[in-house]
Amino acid sequence: MCDNMADLSGAVLEAVNSSEGVDTKDLASQLSVDHQKVVGAVKSLQSLNYIVAEQCVDKCWQLTDEGKSIADGGSHEARIFYAVPSEGIAQAEIMKSVPNAKVGFSKAMQNGWIQIDKKAEGGPKVTKKTESITDTVQECLKRVNQGKDDMTDAQKAECKKRKLITEMKLTSYRLKKGENFSLKIMKQEVDLTPEMIQNGTWKDQSFKPFNFDALGVPPTCGHVHPLLKVRAEYRQIFLEMGFTEMPTNNFIESCFWNFDALFQPQQHPARDAHDTFFVSDPQYADEFPMDYLARVKKVHSEGGYGSQGYNCDWKLEEAKKNILRTHTTAVSTRMLYKLAQQEEFKPVKYFSIDRVFRNEATDATHLAEFHQIEGVVADRGLTLGDLMGIIKEFFKKLGIEEISFKPAYNPYTEPSMEIFGYHEGLQKLVELGNSGIFRPEMLLPMGLPEDVSVIAWGLSLERPTMIKYKIDDIRTLIGPKVDLQMVYDNPICRLDK
């Protein structure tokens, strides 16, 4: 008997060398070793090309637990027969004293081994009908246990019906010499070391082949948050469409650039403490382009450029207040003003994706801080049709083909439209964002030419991310409740899939 795997591997090689075409099943029997251990040694030798193994599948019969019990102690019907004395026994008594008496009694009666006198005094009485019997069931099961398969079809059917035997598939291997066959097992090197290269011993070594299809161990590293994955996909779409990214690193903005320059009145409800986070230190901004500020003040309080304005008392103190920006359109305002200061107007396409802040109660779909995606195009002769066409092309690249528009109101765009897209999963239109053409009251004070139009649209980053990654509560996407394992497990973003 082989004590270890090395001895077993050597025994397998000896057997293959002495008898071409040896079977592992027979070899396991010869070596008195479990067949699976022989198979393990064969797999190891096969990887070294020492041997070639051809799989063979044979069917065989094995005893069930009940079959093993019968092979050892006799069939149920034989036990019934031997439990009946020569003078006979009451049926009720034998049914209590013999295990599995119900099956055994039925089979013994069927075989004609016993008989019953139902009119006997004291109740039905069982007596032997023959002096001796042959327990063929036990004999068949003993032969099966010895690995013999000489039962008749009728015997197999009977034993199978009684669930005494079960058919098993036995996989073995036919062994032959391989390309590198040797009786001596040479250990294959795993690493090519500097010493081997220096002294040249690598030439005489046998190296284990590398499995280039095997996956490596994942390195311990950081992982990109789902929001950033979706952001990268949106950013790529903007860049493919020829847009330039706007700088959005100023989270703190003055009310002038965030509201006033957008022709949003100082009395607008969104500007009070219910919707805006005001900054206490520094409380006020102090650097403005004063000529532009004067034009903004005039169009608000007195009107101009064909507009009657708001006829309100416009206050510089209100415009100077610092806030956490409520939208990235404040960045667009600065960029458009910068564009207006150029000597010669050149058409531009801008985009931004960054964080904004609003004083809202948090729930499953709302946060006090979130991301806004914004696209802006400035050129001569732009119309509402251009806006709708660019938006449709933009969402087409996102994989959303069915786009609808609904008239809406914004203080700084006219006309304004809400954007809806058909959601296949929900089987209905869902709101995707807002859009419009910037008003002359906003553009002309900046100094842009009268024939220049600016179209813009914006949408949320969190909503498509939640849909993409099947997240039902925005608070588990961003904030202190984020599951880091979720960040690790989620795949890259493909919005068109």
Image: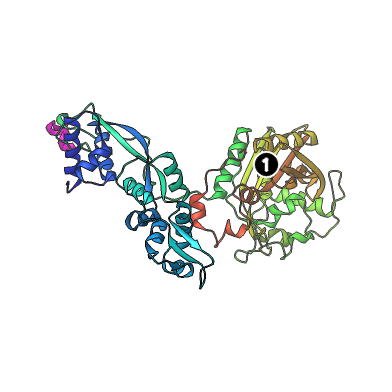
Q: In this picture, is 379 found above or below 105?
A: above
Q: x and y percent of residue 316 in the render?
A: 73, 59
In the rendered view of the protein, which quadrant contains the C terminus? top right
Q: Residue at x 23, y 38 (%)?
A: 191
Residue 166 is at least partly visible in this image: yes
Q: How many marks?
A: 1
Is 433 left or right of 106, judged from the image as shown?
right
Q: x and y percent of residue 187 in the render?
A: 18, 38
The image quarter in which residue 419 lies: top right
Farthest residue in the top direction? Answer: 179
Q: Residue at x 52, y 45 (%)?
A: 491
Q: Is residue 20 magenta?
A: no
The image quarter in which residue 315 lies: bottom right
Give the amino acid type for the residue marked by disc 1 in the picture.
Answer: Gly
Pointer 1 residue: 375
Q: Residue at x 24, y 42 (%)?
A: 28
Provide the secondary structure element on which disc 1 rests. strand
Q: Nearer the viewer, residue 107 or 339?
A: 107
Farthest residue in the bottom direction? Answer: 122
Residue 100 is at least partly visible in this image: no
Q: Is residue 195 magenta?
A: yes
Circle 1 packing at 10 Å, graded few (<14), some (14-19), many (20+), is: many
Q: In this picture, is 75 found above or below 243?
A: below
Give the dominant element type of the magenta stretch: helix, strand or loop: helix
Farthest residue in the left direction? Answer: 199
Q: Nearer the viewer, residue 438 or 478?
A: 478
Is 195 left or right of 81, judged from the image as shown?
left
The segment highlighted magenta reads 193-202
Q: How is the image coloured?
A: rainbow
Q: In this picture, is 216 found above or below 474?
A: above
The image quarter in which residue 89 lies: bottom left
